[in-house]
Amino acid sequence: MTKIIYPIDGKVAVVFPTGELPVDQVALKDVPAGLPFLIVDDADVPEDFSFSDAWVADFSNPDGHGIGHDAWAAQQAAALAQLRESQAPKESQDVDHD
C-alpha cells in the first residue's frame, strides 16, 4: 500500500487512501490546494506516531500539488457531464422536403 504525505504548518501530514479511488485522485482531492504531495510506500512512513511532530520530508520534487476537495469535485462533475453528453443519443435532424 501507499500513503500520501504533504507539508502543513511546519509538519508532515499523512493521508491513508482506502482504495476506493486511485491514489493520485485521492492526493489531488485530499491535499489542500497548492500544497505539494508525495506518494510514498508504507515502509517510508514511521509506524510510531509518537514523534510525528519531528518528521521531515523533502517536497522539492513532489509527485503533484493538491487542488482540494471542492475543485476536485467540480472537476469530476465536469468530466461526468462531458461523458454523459458524448454518450447521449443525437437528436434526429428531420428535414422537411416539401
Image (cartoon, rainbow, N blue to C red):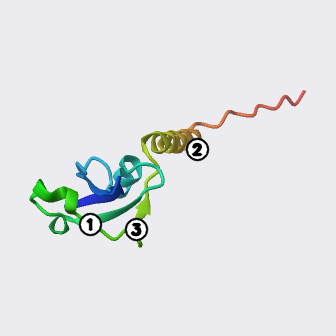
Under circle 3, the secondary element is: loop
Residue at point 14%, 63% (across, down): 46
Q: Nearer the viewer, mark 3 or mark 1?
A: 1
Query: Looking at the rendering, in which quadrant would you find the C terminus?
Result: top right
Under circle 1, the secondary element is: loop
For marks 3 and 1, give the CA distance.
Answer: 14 Å
- Residue count near mark 2 (Cα–Cα under 10 Å), binned few <14, some 14–19, many ≥20: few
Q: Position of residue 21 (x, y in %)?
A: 31, 49
Residue at point 76%, 31% (across, down): 94
Q: Which residue is mark 2?
A: 86
Numbered mark located on residue 62 in the image = 3
Q: Which residue is mark 1?
A: 56
Q: Amino acid at mark 3?
A: Pro
Left or right of residue 22, residue 52 in this image = left
Q: Amino acid at mark 2?
A: Ser
- Residue count near mark 3 (Cα–Cα under 10 Å), binned few <14, some 14–19, many ≥20: some
Q: Nearer the viewer, mark 2 or mark 3?
A: 3
Left or right of residue 13, residue 52 in this image = left
Q: Position of residue 51 (x, y in %)?
A: 14, 58
Residue at point 25%, 51% (across, down): 17
Residue at point 41%, 48% (across, down): 32
Q: Nearer the viewer, mark 1 or mark 2?
A: 1
Q: Position of residue 29 (x, y in %)?
A: 40, 47
Under circle 2, the secondary element is: helix
